[in-house]
Amino acid sequence: MITEFFIAIKPPTVTHQEKQVSVVKGKPVFYEPPEVKAARAMLTAHLGKYIPKKKYTGAVRLVTKWCFPIKGKHIDGEWKTSKPDTDNLQKLLKDCMTDVGYWKDDAQVTSEIAEKFWAERPGIYIKIEELE
């Protein structure tokens, strides 16, 4: 099974790594700042349109191309070498994909290709392939 789609949005630049911690009654309590909650809600809403009919149950390869709106002197298709880091982008995305039901657990992602570019058409390209 292969699932493939493009979400035409301005990719979020806040990441899962930006969780905050506070101390309540001497114990750490982790929470998401409003920007991360908003990014999670946006990703979840868009991902909900492409949920596979059948949940992935085995190993999968996740290919992701993050296409950020062009700024400054960058050109379409140029590698984006500035923040956010791909690993931080992927974490929030995979958590959202787990939450809406693409797979049982994002630990099933055993192969991952993540790229980020400057693009005239911003968005996130996602391809999921079942591995044998």
Image (spheres, rainbow, N blue to C red):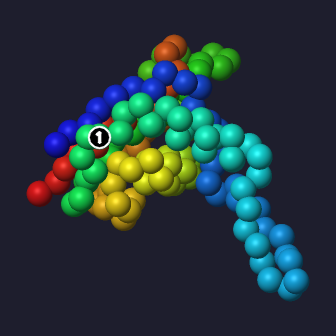
Give the side of residue 109 with respect to residue 30, left or right: left
Work out whether residue 95 or residue 49 is closer to the camera in this orientation and state it.
49
Q: Which residue is mark 1?
A: 52
Which class describes the residues within 10 Å of circle 1: few (<14), some (14-19), or many (20+)?
some
Is residue 12 at least partly visible in the picture?
yes
Q: Farthest residue in the front direction?
A: 53
Q: Residue at x 37, y 33 (%)?
A: 50
Q: Is residue 64 above or below residue 87?
A: above
- Give the image location of residue 9, x and y in percent: 54, 24
Q: Residue at x 33, y 54 (%)?
A: 103
Give the side of residue 16 with respect to residue 114, left or right: right
- Give the image location of residue 113, x and y in percent: 35, 46
Q: Residue at x 78, y 78 (%)?
A: 28
Q: Is residue 92 above or below residue 20?
A: above
Give the side of residue 74 with respect to residue 50, left or right: right
Splitting the image into 4 quarters, where does residue 71 fall?
A: top right
Q: Quadrant of the C terminus?
A: bottom left
Work out whether residue 50 or residue 129 is closer to the camera in this orientation and state it.
50
Give the side of residue 48 with respect to residue 41, left or right: left
Q: Residue at x 31, y 61 (%)?
A: 108
Q: Is residue 19 above or below residue 9?
A: below
- Give the image location of residue 126, x and y in percent: 36, 36
Work out whether residue 55 or residue 84 is closer to the camera in this orientation and state it.
55
Q: Amino acid at mark 1?
A: Pro
- Give the image location of residue 52, x and y in percent: 29, 40
Give the secondary structure at mark 1.
Answer: loop
